[in-house]
Image (cartoon, rainbow, N blue to C red):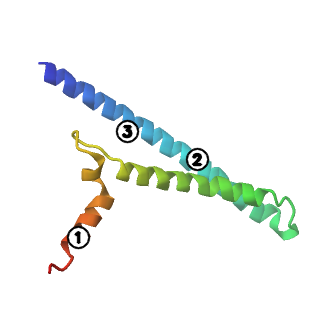
Amino acid sequence: MGSSKDERGGRETRCKKIVKRCIVCFGTFLISMVGGLTLGWWELRYHPTNSQLWMVPFGLVVFVTPAIIWFSIFISDVCNSKEDGNSSLENSVVDSIIVVSIDKLPSG
């Protein structure tokens, strides 16, 4: 009986984590869209006269920053993943690559 409640509680926390991640991804996507729209607006409206140049670096920073954050979170999650109480080194993609590389070394 206790394990059933634990399973339900585990599912609920996993579901909440997934919902939070989806909300964060959607928010960063919207931020990136604001940057892209700022660049597009500058291109159409102000580029011929080269005015309002502040919009270019602003748009680039706002457009690219979410992608950098996604990439860093993904790499961090891959390198620090923990499942079923195993250490992060056992589940790491980097360590798997190292193990495969070591297995392919010539013996001798």
Left or right side of 20 for 42 = right
Mark 2 = which residue? 30
Crowding around mark 1 (Cα neighbors within 10 Å: few <14, some 14 to 19, many 20+) is: few
- Nearest to viewer (mark 3 / mark 2): 3
Residue, x 28% and y 51% (percent of image)?
89
Given the image, on which type of amino acid does mark 3 rest?
Ile
Given the image, on which type of amino acid does mark 1 rest?
Ile
Q: Position of residue 4 (x, y in %)?
A: 15, 23
Q: Earlier in the sequence, mark 2 or mark 1?
A: 2
Q: Position of residue 73 (x, y in %)?
A: 46, 49
Q: Position of residue 17 (x, y in %)?
A: 38, 35
Extreme residue toward the front, this view: 108
| Quadrant assignment, res 82 | top left
Given the image, on which type of amino acid does mark 2 rest?
Leu
Mark number, residue 26: none
Crowding around mark 3 (Cα neighbors within 10 Å: few <14, some 14 to 19, many 20+) is: few
Mark number, residue 18: 3
Q: SS for tag 2? A: helix
- Nearest to viewer (mark 1 / mark 3): 1
Could you tell me how far apart the alpha carbons at marks 3 and 2 are, in whole angstroms?
18 Å
Residue, x 26% and y 29% (percent of image)?
10
